[in-house]
Amino acid sequence: MNVGDFVRGVYKTGVYAGELMQVEQEKGRALVKVLAVLKHPMQGDLHNPKEANVPFFHERKALACYEKAWMPLSQLKPFEGEPPAYEASLEKALEEMKESLASDTSEWAKRSIEVLAQVEKEYGR
């Protein structure tokens, strides 16, 4: 992968398509400019995934359009074709997350749905 290539990368629990801006081989990371959301980040505590009874249940928004994030090189793959439009990709990722949570009866899923409703308001939906 070279600077300027489109990549698929994982940042925390979200998956994004973006443009490779810079590579730091010695640190094992790359700077990626976000162009699309492929999977919305999970809600809750990263250290206790899918647990509802945690001291702080985190509200996680997706990275913004054109936001730059350092991602581990091990979590990057080439992205085939052009990334989808950011707004449409965010909407699709949100809907997919809500659909998967709707079929889950756990307390974590219920809290995640509540938190996602707030996240959607912050997105202006």
Image (cartoon, grey):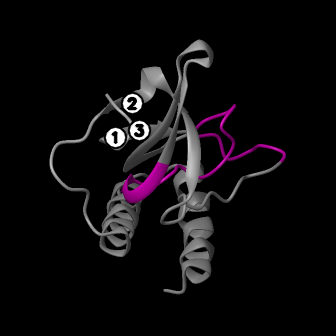
Are circles 2 and 1 on residues that touch, CB within 8 Å?
yes
- Classify mark 2: residues with Cα within 10 Å, few (<14), some (14-19) or many (20+): many
Are circles 2 and 3 on residues that touch, CB within 8 Å?
yes
The residue positioned 58% from the left and 45% from the top of the image is: 69
Q: Where is residue 54, by image quadrant?
A: top right
Instruction: Classify the position of the N terminus by image quarter.
Output: top left
Find residue 42 and report its horizontal and vertical position in percent.
53, 49
Find residue 18 and report its horizontal and vertical position in percent.
38, 50
Residues 62 and 110: in front is 62
Disc 3 designates what residue?
A: 9
Residue at the extreme left of the image, as rendered: 81
- Classify mark 1: residues with Cα within 10 Å, few (<14), some (14-19) or many (20+): many
Q: Residue 4: say if magenta.
A: no
Residue 12 located left or right of residue 34: right
Q: Main secondary structure of the magenta part?
A: loop
Find residue 52 and report its horizontal and vertical position in percent.
67, 47
Disc 1 designates what residue?
A: 8
- In the rendered structure, which amino acid carries the disc numbered 2? Leu
Are circles 1 and 3 on residues that touch, CB within 8 Å?
yes
Find residue 15 and report its horizontal and vertical position in percent.
41, 45
Which labelled disc corresponds to residue 76?
2
- In the rendered structure, which amino acid carries the disc numbered 1? Arg
Secondary structure of the residue carrying tag 2 is strand
Establish if 11 lies above or below 67.
above
Establish if 116 lies above or below 5.
below
Q: Which residues are magenta?
A: 33-55
